[in-house]
Image (tube, rainbow, N blue to C red):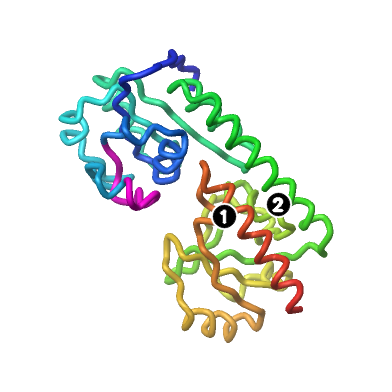
Amino acid sequence: MGQHHARWASGARIVSLVPSITELICDLGLSAQLVGRTGFCIHPRDIVRRIPKVGGTKDVKLARIRALEPTHVIVNIDENPKPIADALAAWVPHVVVTHPCMPEDNRALYRLLGGIFDRDAAAARLVAEFDAALAAARAVGQRLRPENVLYLIWRAPWMTVAPQTYVSATLAAVGWHTQPAAAALRYPEFGWDAPWLKGVERVLLSSEPYRFRAPHVDEVQALGGRPAQLIDGEWASWYGSRAIHGLRALTDLRLRLAADG
């Protein structure tokens, strides 16, 4: 966003309005400076349960944040409404705006927060772990035959992800290419008679934002006649330090499903 944030060596009071970044803040060794988080910030559980909630990612309680007197509030373009960020900027010294669009953007995210909060060594360690996980994922994606997949995020109406999303870019690392191949919306609705579904080889049912369960797998297989699989949504959609775990888990799943035929 063209903003400059000076290094803050100590004494920061951080409110994170982004679940995956709340975890990243903790993994950078900054949990003692985290003074507020959303109700969707659930990792690491033993730490965040002691941190005050300030509402959800969309329905932030500004008065609660103000009472916490933060020096920094971290927001995300996709997760938090712009009017919320604009309101915070009126009295929070630093509103840090993030917008990872693909897995590779995690490197810059680690370095950004590591630089602001004087945690460069921890950020460098995460970059090294991320690079190793991404390289392993891509090696599997290149070795196995590519698959066209339908990644379900909602039911009634049925919704999926477009190629320009972080989810789609993450799945592509292991050779799963989301369909439709083009979409005007980032999260398009569709019907099971859509012509592009003919090219789908596998359906992945995400655990978030809609919590698909085993009965939905049977429903989807009956509708589409294709193999269907539940998948932890955090693996594909969470950035920050959880992206390292997510890439490793997706790599293992891709190998296992390929072995099963």
Q: Decide if residue 4 is on the left or right side of residue 166.
A: left
Q: Nearer the viewer, residue 51 or 169?
A: 51
Q: Nearer the viewer, residue 166 or 83?
A: 166
Q: Residue at x 36, y 33 (%)?
A: 82
Q: Amino acid at mark 2?
A: Ala
Contact, CB < 8 Å: mark 1 with mark 2? no
The C terminus, quarter of image: bottom right
**Is 189 situated above or below 20?**
below
Per the image, is 15 magenta?
no
Q: Position of residue 90 (x, y in %)?
A: 26, 20
**Is 155 situated above or below 62?**
below
Q: Residue at x 68, y 67 (%)?
A: 196
Question: Circle 1 is placed at which residue position?
Answer: 236
Spatial CA distance of label 1 from label 2 is 10 Å
**Is 238 situated above or below 117?**
below
Q: Decide if residue 199 is on the left or right side of residue 115.
A: right
The boundaries of the magenta stretch are 36-47
Q: Amino acid at mark 1?
A: Ala
The image's mark for residue 16 is: none
The image's mark for residue 173 is: 2
Q: Nearer the viewer, residue 153 or 38?
A: 38
Q: Position of residue 160 (x, y in %)?
A: 54, 61
First in sequence: mark 1 vs mark 2: 2
